[in-house]
Image (spheres, rainbow, N blue to C red):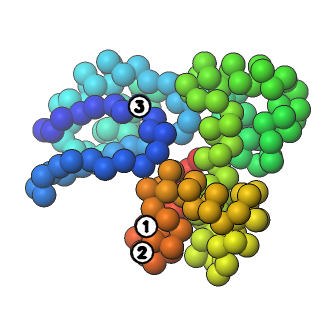
Amino acid sequence: MGEWFVTDLADSAYAVQCNPEDYFIGFRCRPGVQFATDTLLRVVRHCHLDDSIKILSYLEECTSINQDVIEALEVLAKTSSVADSARLLGISERSLERHLQRHTDRSPCYWRNLARVRRAGAELAHTSSLSTLAANHGYADQAHMSRAFKQWFGHSPNVLRNDPALLAALSNSGY
């Protein structure tokens, strides 16, 4: 049957120690999703890892989405500052900070930085100059962007650019 667990949101890439015969399947949820974790783990523990239809059904039953969080994150992803995001949402910066901290355990700056590095990562294959890519996404310089890539993705932009599998993963949808 396998072992089931729910992990907290990671703040950066990390390695997982495992055996060569270990098999993993994961489900990444949108930011703002709330889990009935105990209920979810109780119902999925009898599922086979390959029964994704049943697992997805249980996930849907045991989660809820806060639409205010989704809206706030969408605005943060498209604006250049937290202040601009708060203004567009019609709330104060402090209210935005409290709201996201309460529902995601992360600050607006966290989500804005993640959206920025994901946008830059998605364009990595289509931009020849890393300094131009950095400038286009609001990084002070190429080194600043490279540090962000290493923090969030675990690799430098050059390593990601030269690995087709990693490059493809950067273009996946998600926050």
The spot of residue 63 in percent (x, y) is 46, 26
Residue 112 in picture, x, y percent from top left: 68, 43
> Nearest the camera: 43 or 3?
3
Eyeballing the image, is 19 above or below 133? above
- Secondary element at tag 1: helix
Which residue does the numbered mark 2 point to in the structure image? 163
Q: Of helix, strand and loop, which one carries label 3?
A: loop
Specify the label residue 134 is tagged with: none
Residue at screen point 77% across, 49% down = 78
**Does residue 124 show up?**
yes
Q: Position of residue 104 (x, y in %)?
A: 57, 27
Q: Are marks 1 and 2 in contact (CB under 8 Å)?
A: yes
Mark 1 / mark 3, whichever is N-terminal: 3
Question: What's the residue at 54%, 39% (across, down)?
Answer: 30
Residue 166 — which label?
Answer: 1
Q: What amino acid is labelled 3 in the image? A: Asp
Q: Earlier in the sequence, mark 3 or mark 2?
A: 3
| Disc 1 residue type (three-letter) | Leu
Tag 3 and tag 2, C-beta contact below 8 Å: no
Pick out the residue farthest to the bottom. 128
Q: Are marks 1 and 3 in contact (CB under 8 Å)?
A: no
Query: Cα distance, mark 1 to mark 2?
Result: 5 Å
Residue 92 vertical position relative to residue 17 in the rendered view, above or below: above
Q: Quadrant of residue 83?
A: top right
The residue wearing badge 3 is 8
